[in-house]
Image: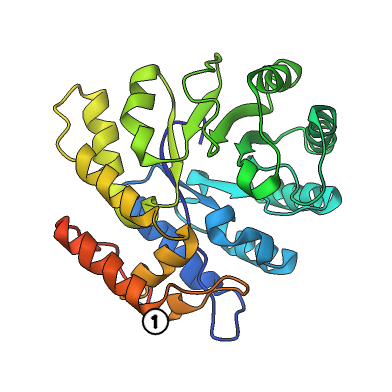
Amino acid sequence: MTELRGIFAATISVFNDDLSLNIEKTIEHSENIINEGCHGVVMFGSTGQAQYISVSEKISLINQLSKSKYSDQFIIGTGLNSLIEIINFMKTSCSLNFNNFLVMPPAFYSYDELGVKKFYEKIIESVPTSKIILYNFEALCGFKFNENLVRDLKKQFPDQIVGIKDTTGNLFKKIKIDNFSYFLGTELNLLEGLKFGYAGIITANANVSASLSRKVYDDFLSKKEQTVNEKLHNIRKLFDKYNTITGLHAYLSQSDKLLENILPPLSLLKEGDKKDLIQNLKKLDFQLTLKSVA
């Protein structure tokens, strides 16, 4: 993976009945998403419940992931709060030829821009071969990137800071930097973002609607008429009514009951909400085409 552009899924994680990480099925699911049209997949992002998964399980998974035929299409999320653990995990990932990372500032405690700069400085000093996508998700970590901070980090580390995933959305159409990949966090702005010159999207919904996002992307590049963008928006709006992780697991569990397993304190959608979600998606003439991981 060189230039980061296109449709990327923030993959879910699959868990066994004892809530241990099912490495084989998690990898299989992520490969299936790529087959559905994604240019790549983020492993251990927020959708994958990364903060709740042990470091040892993460390391076991990336060791297996390095054997995937799609290994060069993965971005590794850190999903950790400890700076030392982040650095060690990234070093291990780099040793397996995973150099692209999605890195969010730690959750818990309040901090300022100076602290965030120091955080990324320490990572890059320790892992200089890393290529980092900043993760702007204020609702999870309590910190919101601004334009000046992003520009400063890119200027200070032009080879290591390669992009941003702007889930918070406060930077949308406010920032545009050379050799820097801006990724949207929602399909609702995908087409508008592409028109503005942005790189693409990193999205949880690509776990179910990758083929539609890819068609919007490809049709934009080919200057073809957009025929599925409205449908893609409506699907996203339905999932946005629920917790993203629990909604995706509930919907995907139709093909594999193992996907009903979710790490507490998260819990699956209530049965009534699950039925409503499935019925409303059917009304949109949408059905799951993703190959089962069962």
Q: Which residue is drawn at 44% across and 27% down?
A: 199
> Quick check: can you spot residue 108?
yes
Q: Please determine whether, in this image, residue 117 is positioned above or below residue 73.
A: above
Between 40 and 274, which is closer to the camera in this rendering?
274
Amino acid type, residue under disc 1 in the picture? Lys
Classify 288 as above or below 98. below
Quarter holding residue 208: bottom left
Q: Where is residue 160 in the image (x, y as percent from the top left)?
A: 69, 28
Q: In this view, does 265 lie to the left or right of 5?
A: right
Please report the residue visible at 84 percent of the width from the left and 27 percent of the height from the top.
114
Residue positioned 60% across, 80% down in the render:
19
Q: How many labels does the image show?
A: 1
Residue at image point 44% right, 31% down: 5
Q: In this view, does 82 lie above or below 114?
A: below
Q: Which residue, given by chain and number where applicable, does mark 1 sit on?
A: 257
Give the left or right position of residue 13, taking residue 215 as reference: right
Image position of 97 with respect to 43: above or below: above
User: Which one is nearer the viewer's eye here, 86 or 272?
Assistant: 272
- Percent position (x, y) of residue 115? 84, 33
Q: Quadrant of residue 252?
A: bottom left
Percent coordinates x, y for residue 230 in the rendering? 21, 40
In which quadrant of the rendered image does the C terminus lie? bottom left
